[in-house]
Image (spheres, rainbow, N blue to C red):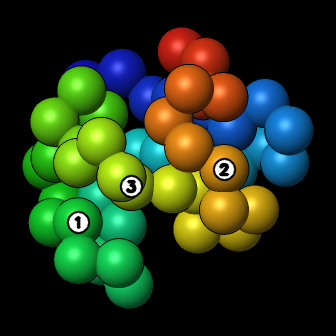
């Protein structure tokens, strides 16, 4: 699965890890994240992420 990086802050979303602190299970592809999911570091939306 592809990783995605938040361009403003550098946070990397790794689908193998997910975002368990925010209810996103490991194995969740970036495309399958809820539309209202935000970067856990800076709070910006999915639209600022780019494919790593």
Image location (x, y in percent) of residue 41: 70, 67
Badge nearest the viewer, 2 or 1: 2
At x 23%, y 66%, the residue is 24
Disc 2 and disc 1 in contact, CB within 8 angstroms? no
Question: Could you classify mark 2 by the number of other residues whose Cα lies within 10 Å: few (under 14), some (14-19), or many (20 or more)?
Answer: some
Give how far across and how far down residue 20 sits, in percent.
Answer: 30, 77
Where disc 3 sits, the SS reads loop
Using the rendered view, name the quadrant where residue 8 is placed.
top right
In this rendering, is residue 34 above or below 18?
A: above
- State the residue position of label 1: 24
Using the rendered image of the protein, determine whether residue 51 is visible from the camera's viewpoint: yes
Question: Left of 33 or right of it: where is 32?
Answer: left
Q: Residue furthest top?
A: 51
**In the rendered structure, which disc, 2 or 3, sits on the residue that comes first in sequence?**
3
Q: Is residue 42 above or below residue 33?
A: below
Residue 25: give x, y in percent of width and height.
15, 66
Q: Which residue is mark 2?
A: 44
**Drawn side of residue 45 relative to residue 7, left or right:** left
Disc ID at residue 49: none
Q: In the image, what residue occupies the spot 24% across and 26% down? A: 31
Estimate how packed mark 3 is, as few (under 14), some (14 to 19) or many (20 or more) residues with alpha carbons within 10 Å: some
């Amino acid at each position: 699965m592809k990783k995605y990086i938040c361009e403003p802050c550098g946070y990397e979303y790794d689908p193998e890890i997910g975002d368990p602190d925010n209810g996103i299970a490991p194995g969740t592809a970036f495309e399958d994240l809820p539309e209202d999911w935000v970067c856990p570091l800076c709070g910006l939306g999915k639209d600022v992420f780019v494919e790593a």
